[in-house]
Every structure is written in structure tokens, then in C-alpha cells.
């Protein structure tokens, strides 16, 4: 892009060792048809698998769109994210991870939505969810019906009903969030909370992107378990931040309890008994629990035997799912 032409929209791409996916990701960006100028800032976090070379290839082929940001060493996903956004010039910022895709029309439709809805801080859309290797369509997200406009209370109560790769946010809203390096492992939720306290959340029900779901195996074992617990801890900081921003404490407590209950059940599916008991106990200690959690969380937190049965069932269900998928692939 000519430096004298200021883009209205900046696409923010964070990538690290995405050589298998980044070409399709960038192609989905440069093919967008819009009535406004846009750029794509691509932050490569010192990839070693050829990702950087593909980014440079696109920058050479589409210099009017692609602006590479190549780090001289590995700085981590959170800091790469922050650096990418700081390098942008657009008044609207659209996120896309390096292994995801946008469908034709995404940028124009989100731009038009925010132009017509000044009360909205950001807008998200529905996505197709595919397997890690792209061979299977796993469904859509969100599956449930969502209102066209919602609030921070809705976000806190339901956790993230959208994926970060579907978000377009106003620049002045985004750059209010604190640059806290302690949230560098998982900052999506905290940033969404920050943004949603400065305006409403818009939702486009049309599928305008493709989200790649990572393998659950990547979060099992000692290293994967540590990563999972770091993500959970970082996400919980989002609830703390919501309280600091004066979000209704009852809503925050209910949202935290729901998230911790889900984290406990996720640990159960991985066979992590200690993690399940830890997060179930934390969920049980939250006041203002609602629904099934209000009865189950204290029971499971106080009964390791029942919790153990759930862990065993989780492992069985996971194994059965893998056997079924292997059978479907071989048939």
C-alpha cells in the first residue's frame, strides 16, 4: 500500500510455525473485496518451519496490503499480538490467527456494521470449525442463537461465545487495554472484557470465517497440562479485570463459577484428577452459582470417589471418540 494512503481497516495476523496454514490464511485476506483501503500486518514470532518465507513472498507479491513484522527472536504469542496491533494504522482492527481463514465479504460486512452501529465497540461473526488437519467440519460457532447486540454482562455470563479470529474492534477501544505481560499466554478473554466495557458487542449471524481447532492431545501430558493451567489462570484474570471495571459482581461470580466448572470437566476428559478437583473446588466456592452447577460443584468437590468416576468416564469417552473417528476414516 502506498504509505500516503491510510487504511481504514487493519487485519492483524499473529503467526508462529504455521507453514501448513499461513498461505491459505493470507490468500483469504488479499482476496477480500472492499470499497475502502485495508492492510494486513503479519507478525511472525521467529518461525523456524518456513512460515517467514511465505509471509515475505506475500509481502513481495502484495506490497499494497501485506506489511510483515518479523521478530529477530521468539517473544511469545501475547507479546507478538501486542506488537502486531501497535504496528497497525487502521481505525478498525480485524483479528485473524495464522491458521484460520476469512471468507469473502468479511471485512466489508463488519466495516458496514460498525459504521451503522456507533454504540458497538466491536463486532464478531459465526465461523465454521474444522479439525486441526482441515479434513473435517466439526460444526459452527456459536451454535446457539445470539442477539445482534449484546453487553459485557452477556459476555461474562457465557464466557466467549465467539472466536477471536472473528473480531473487528474500533481502534480507540482496543488500545485502552492494559499491556500486562502476565496475561501473555491467553489474553483473548481479558481483551474482550476490556472492549465490551467501552461499548456493546455486535454479532453477524452469517458464517464469515473458518476456525481451526487444535488437537486436545496438545493439552495432555506434563507440558500440555502446564499450558492448559496457564491458559485457565490467564482467563481467570479476565474475571478479576471485570470486577476492576465495575461489572456487576453477581454476574462475574456466576460467570467465574461456570468457567471453572467447565475447566474441571475439561481436565476430567484429559484424565487430570488433580486439575479437576482443583477447579471444581474453586467453582464450588463461588457464590451465586446457577443451575446444575449449584448442585454438582459442591458434591464433586467433596467426593473424590465420584470425581474419579467422572474422570474415568471422560477418558473412556475420549478413547471411544478416537476409535469412532479412526473407523470412519478407514471405511
Image (cartoon, helix red, strand yellow):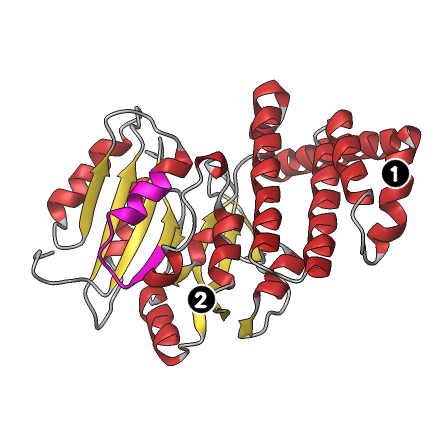
Q: Quadrant of residue 235?
A: top right
Q: Is residue 252 left or right of residue 82?
A: right
| SS under mark 1 | helix
Q: Quadrant of residue 252?
A: bottom right
- Above or below for 249 versus 138: below
Rendered image: mark on residue 124 = none
Segment colored magenta = 80-94
Q: Nearer the viewer, residue 5 or 214?
A: 5
Query: What residue is drawn where x is 47% and y is 50%?
Result: 211
Find residue 158 and report its horizontal and vertical position in percent. 65, 58
Find residue 72 and report its horizontal and vertical position in percent. 23, 26
Dot placed on the residue nearer the N-terminal end, 2 or 1? 2
Marks 2 & 1, CB-CB < 8 Å contact: no
Residue assigned mark 2:
123
Q: Nearer the viewer, residue 135 or 157?
A: 157
**Image quadrant containing the N terminus:** bottom left
Q: Is residue 284 left or right of residue 207?
A: right
Query: What residue is drawn where x is 91% and y is 41%?
Result: 299
Is residue 82 within the magenta segment? Answer: yes
**Residue at far top of view:** 222
Query: What residue is drawn where x is 46% and y is 59%?
Result: 195
Find residue 113 and report its horizontal and vertical position in percent. 39, 75
Query: What residue is drawn where x is 7% and y is 57%?
Result: 2
Is residue 292 within the magenta segment? Answer: no
Mark 2 neighbour class, 10 Å CA radius: few under 14, some 14 to 19, many 20 or more: many
Residue assigned mark 1:
300
Amino acid at each position: 500500500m502506498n504509505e500516503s494512503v491510510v487504511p481504514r481497516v487493519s487485519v492483524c495476523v499473529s503467526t508462529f510455525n504455521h507453514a501448513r496454514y499461513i498461505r491459505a490464511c493470507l490468500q483469504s485476506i488479499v482476496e477480500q473485496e472492499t470499497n475502502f483501503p485495508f492492510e494486513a500486518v503479519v507478525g511472525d514470532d521467529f518461525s523456524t518451519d518456513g512460515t517467514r518465507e511465505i509471509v515475505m513472498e506475500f509481502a513481495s507479491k502484495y506490497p499494497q496490503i501485506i506489511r510483515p513484522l518479523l521478530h529477530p527472536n521468539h517473544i511469545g504469542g501475547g507479546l507478538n499480538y501486542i506488537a502486531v496491533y501497535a504496528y497497525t494504522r487502521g481505525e478498525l482492527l480485524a483479528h485473524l490467527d495464522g491458521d484460520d481463514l476469512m471468507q469473502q465479504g468479511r471485512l466489508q460486512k463488519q466495516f458496514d456494521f460498525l459504521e451503522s452501529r456507533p454504540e458497538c465497540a466491536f463486532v464478531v461473526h459465526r465461523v465454521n470449525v474444522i479439525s486441526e488437519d482441515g479434513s473435517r467440519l466439526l460444526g459452527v460457532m456459536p451454535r446457539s442463537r445470539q442477539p445482534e447486540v449484546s453487553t459485557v454482562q452477556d459476555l461474562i455470563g457465557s464466557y466467549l461465545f465467539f472466536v477471536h479470529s472473528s473480531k473487528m474492534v474500533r481502534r480507540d477501544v482496543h488500545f485502552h487495554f492494559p499491556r500486562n505481560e502476565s496475561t501473555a499466554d491467553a489474553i483473548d478473554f481479558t481483551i474482550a472484557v476490556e472492549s465490551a466495557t467501552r461499548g456493546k458487542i455486535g454479532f453477524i449471524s452469517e458464517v464469515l470465517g473458518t476456525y481451526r481447532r487444535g488437537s486436545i492431545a496438545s493439552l495432555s501430558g506434563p507440558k500440555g497440562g502446564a499450558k492448559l493451567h496457564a491458559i485457565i489462570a490467564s482467563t481467570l484474570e479476565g474475571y478479576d479485570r471485570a470486577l476492576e471495571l465495575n461489572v456487576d459482581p453477581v454476574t462475574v461470580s456466576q460467570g467465574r463459577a461456570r468457567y471453572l466448572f467447565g475447566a474441571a470437566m475439561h481436565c476430567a476428559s484429559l484424565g487430570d484428577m488433580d486439575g479437576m478437583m482443583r477447579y471444581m473446588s474453586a467453582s464450588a466456592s463461588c457464590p451465586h452459582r446457577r443451575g446444575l452447577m449449584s448442585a454438582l460443584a459442591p458434591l464433586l468437590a467433596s467426593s473424590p470417589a465420584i470425581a474419579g468416576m467422572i474422570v474415568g468416564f471422560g477418558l473412556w469417552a475420549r478413547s471411544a471418540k478416537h476409535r469412532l473417528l479412526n473407523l470412519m476414516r478407514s471405511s
